[in-house]
Image (tube, rainbow, N blue to C red):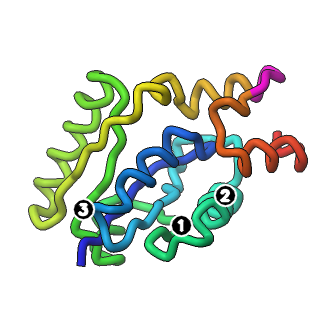
Amino acid sequence: MRICLFPGTFDPVTLGHVDIINRALPLFDKIYVGIGLNSSKSPMFSAEQRVNWVKEIYKNEPKVESVMYDGLTINYCRIIKANFILRGIRYVSDFEYEKTIADANRTLDRSIETVFLTGEPKYTSVASTIVRDIIKNGGDASLFLPDLVGKSIHENHLL
């Protein structure tokens, strides 16, 4: 079985994230969207909210499961029996950063392979950091967010 972990903070879930997940669906039997709990980051949205967004977006897709995890990504891959790590790439600089992590992960466990998917050009500028900045400053981030996420932020005043 081809099981992958798509790790990240997903703070918030963007159209870029959804693009990568949707294009990965034919490649894997199971995709765990792993909301990493990183003590060095202060997320805008709770981990539970981010997990719920992914669950709601993919409620009709049994191949996608949203989970929270802490610690090394490679260790969580072992727990869920994932033999692939999925990463999205927007720019060359993303690749350089992600390759360094992939090399370290390969050193820790040669049985887990990292797979890179390049984002659709229309989502290249969609970065969670930029989206959070737009939201913090009262701008309309809906162009960068799945409808469900945008409505949830607006209706529930999740700022």
Element type at marker 1? strand
Q: Which residue is mark 3?
A: 84
Return the disc, 2 or 1, that comes first in the chain's sequence. Answer: 2
Query: How much space separates mark 3 and mark 2, taking CA atoms?
Result: 23 Å
The residue segment tinted magenta is 135-140
Element type at marker 2? helix
Which residue occupies the foreground of this view, 30 or 35? 30
Return the disc, 3 or 2, that comes first in the chain's sequence. Answer: 2
Query: How much space separates mark 2 and mark 1, taking CA atoms?
Result: 9 Å
Q: Residue at x 38, y 51 (%)?
A: 23
Q: Residue at x 21, y 52 (%)?
A: 114
Query: How much space separates mark 1 and mark 3, taking CA atoms?
Result: 16 Å
Check disc 2: other Cα within 10 Å, few if <14, some if 14-19, many if 20+. many
Which residue occupies the foreground of this view, 157 or 59? 59
Q: Which residue is mark 2?
A: 53
Element type at marker 3? strand
> Residue 155: horizontal and vertical position, in percent?
90, 47
Amino acid type, mark 1:
Ser
Q: Do the CB atoms of the residues marked 2 and 1 lie less than 8 Å apart?
A: yes
> Residue 26: horizontal and vertical position, in percent?
32, 62
Magenta span includes 36: no
Which residue occupies the foreground of this view, 45 or 1? 1
Q: Dominant secondary structure of the magenta stretch?
A: loop
Q: Which residue is mark 1?
A: 66
> Residue 53: horizontal and vertical position, in percent?
66, 58
> Residue 1: horizontal and vertical position, in percent?
24, 79
Amino acid type, mark 3:
Phe
Decide: is 82 above or below 153.
below
The reply, left or right, for residue 56 in relation to residue 150 is left
